[in-house]
Amino acid sequence: MLVVIALITLLMAMIQPSLSRSKEIARRTKCGSNLRQTGVGHQAFADDHGGVLPPGQAATGQAGFGIYAVYVSSMTNHPEFGRYRAHGILGHRNYIPDPRVFYCPSWHGYPLQFDKSLPPGGGWPADGVLPSGQAWIQTNFHYRSTFGGSNSPTDWRPARFDGDASTSAIMADAFSDPNRGVDVHHADGYNTLFIDSHVSFKNDPEHFVRDYNGGFSYHAGNTDYQLMEEVWRGFFDE
């Protein structure tokens, strides 16, 4: 009996890495599916707005709130979008019926998921009402809003359905803050959504994204946005 137990224990130890890998592949696939659904919402929004996608933090010029927030209670109340921005607008205006797609099941860093409040921030509330003490809504996908003719902040604007939409990335697994984003979704790379709504996985075995700013956060502000745009162009675009 002891020999049988020892053999079972050994076999379990041998197959555990394969099981863990299989589970991560399933989570990564679900993550990519979530991004693809978000892409469909982007296209529907652009159809109603002259081909222009939602504005993000760089385009709104309110950089102090950081990269993840899609709703900020203290932000200027836009007549159409309220205090939402980036892909948060898609949930606010029901282009995305279920905001759960804004979250990656592989996220295991900063504890941020749908309907999880971590004041002063937190995830998207299930009933749409922010809990007491929560001032902003965050997701764990990174939205690109630094499109333009150059890296100058005066040129940044929301993405448009012009040029080659199949090669321009618009969203990806969060990567801008090493304390919460870099390498905590998928250890070997990043799911990436393109303007034409296709999703591909960008391998990063050399940790180019993590190390581009010397391992430090490039989280918000003009200098950081320039670095982020360089990463979008140099790594994510095809």
Image (cartoon, rainbow, N blue to C red):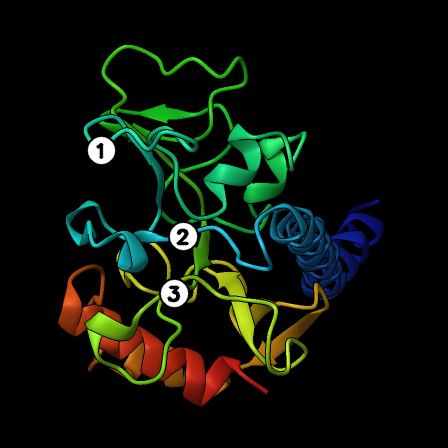
User: Which residue is located at x 50 percent, y 59 percent?
Assistant: 185
Identify whether 8 is placed above or below 203.
above
**Nearer-N-terminus badge (3/1):** 1
Real-space CA distance between mark 2 and mark 3, rounded to the nearest whole angstrom: 19 Å
Give the percent coordinates (x, y) of residue 130.
Answer: 37, 16
SS class, disc 2: loop
Real-space CA distance between mark 1 and mark 2, rounded to the nearest whole angstrom: 13 Å
Q: Which residue is mark 2?
A: 55
Q: Which residue is mark 1?
A: 76
Neighbourhood count class around disc 3 (C-alpha, 10 Å): few under 14, some 14–19, many 20 upward: many
SS class, disc 3: loop
Q: Which residue is mark 3?
A: 175
Left or right, 234 with reference to 132: right
Question: In the rendered view of the protein, which quadrant contains the C terminus?
Answer: bottom right
**Nearer-N-terminus badge (1/2):** 2
SS class, disc 1: loop
Name the amino acid, label 1. Answer: Thr
**Nearer-N-terminus badge (2/3):** 2
- Report the disc number at residue 54: none
User: Which residue is located at x 78 percent, y 48 percent?
Assistant: 5
**Front in this rendered view, residue 178 or 235:** 235
